[in-house]
Amino acid sequence: MTGAEQSANMTESAASKLLNGETCLWTSNGKKPGRNGFVKTHCIFQQQKCRRPKEDFVPLYQDFENFYTRNLYMRIRDNWNRPICSVPGAKMDVMEHVTHDYNWTFKHTGTVLIDVINMGSYNYLGFAENSGLCADAAAQATMKYSMGVCGTRHEIGNLDKHEELEKLVARFLGVESSMVFGMGFATNSMNIPALAGKGCLILSDELNHASLVLGARLSGSTIRVFKHNNMQSLEKLLMDAIVHGQPRTHRPWKKILILVEGIYSMEGSIVRLPEVISLKKKYRAYLYLDEAHSIGALGPGGRGVVDYFGLDPCDVDIMMGTFTKSFGAAGGYIGGNKMTDIPAQIGYILELIDYLRTHSHSAIYATSMSPPVAQQIITSMKCIMGEDGTTLGQERLCQLSKNTTYFRRRLQEMGFIIYGNNNSPVVPLMLYMPAKIGAFGREMLKRNIGTVVVGFPATPIIESRARFCVSAAHTKEMLDTALNAISEVGDLLQLKYSRHARPSNEETKQFSYLDSHQD
């Protein structure tokens, strides 16, 4: 009998046994759940439970992440995926869930935790709301356009709202043109491959977001990583690239693209943009700036890290950002001016956005942005720019700056170690030990504070942290309530690692909320 016949007989025998229900460990009568809690009664799933060792198969995945998931993540999984049933504003309602199988599955108890102070959402300017100017405008757009477009921009999915939004974004950024996308992650991962390819060099910060990393890998370019915000490391890579060229052939690189973020979401640090621009001009490289967390949250006009440093937007070749944070919406954008040699194979001047419209997978194949989402962005952006006839946008920018300075200073006075720039609304509080991740998240929720705790693989395994996101919607009373809870939990878990001298009680009392913004 040939190998193919033996294989066919084995398959037929296994299939007949499955249909007869003879050899499976789990049957539909017993309805025993698997380790993930699901009852698998279909014969296809039952076949996976048969007593046939897969001797000829290598493990599907077997690495350190598998070890971490099984031995640590599953024990503290209750700190994530908590469903909320309200607007993710300054306060939110959290649905309580419990587990009876060691965090493999969860069940809702029917209890809702009311008015939990939200210290985890990216709602920097407080535009994630269900009432007010933005919500009313989005509702009107829904009545006029419906929820979905059901088509791509190249087909029948191009609305007047999309073109209005793109002109507004270009004016907001101070660039010639822009293009919007329905998904922030895909804005990076699908557009970088259109801008770089084989024979190109991408220099990426070691702490760049996963979307930037994925986009760089999909491009097929050579990738080299420089130390976080380290200009000496970046310049060394640029010098080596110019001197040595491509590996083996030593031909010049077709182009060099530097990838950086405005605010790094896990570090709270702000990119040293003036120095990056100086290096990119010196070595004639292109600069791709991801302003997902900085747009709307930094700068006197809310125009991001370029506005924060008072730089010329023309010095940044590709400006990218998302609408999911400060604008309380969804999607992303890319803006820029006329550039030379964007596609590696074309040698004439081509407008960046026109090129992306015909070469970006996210532009060609993805469904267009939802009309109410586009309207939410338009309304909130006009509010920030002051074009709505009010000062609400400027007031929120000032409030966010005050809240950020106050919150960070109080945490430092308490003795916590926090990362990031003093003006960054992303505030990582270091827990360090992985075992304290679950304890911190649970204890904070007991005190009606919703937080985000972060561990491996998002951070190094011994640099676990809690990440707070400050919002303009937070009042001083909310921040003080959260700070008191953080201090209490910090004492309980012994998290006050800082060795800096702490102010006395009287000095702390003399420090006022308004004083926090004097500098």
Image (cartoon, grey):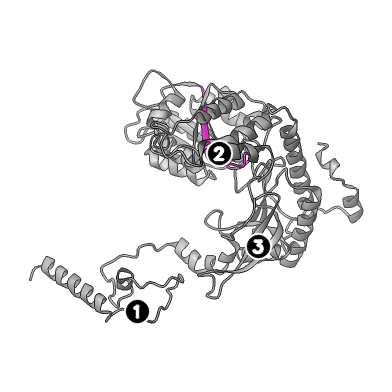
Q: Nearer the viewer, mark 1 or mark 2?
A: 2
Secondary structure under tag 3 reads helix
**What residue sits right under mark 3 in the picture?**
441
In the depicted structure, whether residue 205 falls above or below residue 20 = above
Q: Residues within 10 Å of mark 1 (few under 14, many from 20)?
A: some
Q: Is residue 262 left or right of residue 286?
A: right
Q: Residues within 10 Å of mark 2 (few under 14, many from 20)?
A: few
In the depicted structure, whether residue 150 falls above or below residue 162 = below
* Three-letter code for the amino acid on which mark 1 is drawn: Thr
Which mark is first along the chain, 1 or 3? 1
* Three-letter code for the amino acid on which mark 2 is drawn: Met
Q: Does the rendering let one see residue 278?
A: no
- In depth, the one of 234 and 33 nearer the eye is 33
Q: Residue furthest front?
A: 143
Which mark is first along the chain, 3 or 2? 2
Q: Residue furthest left?
A: 1
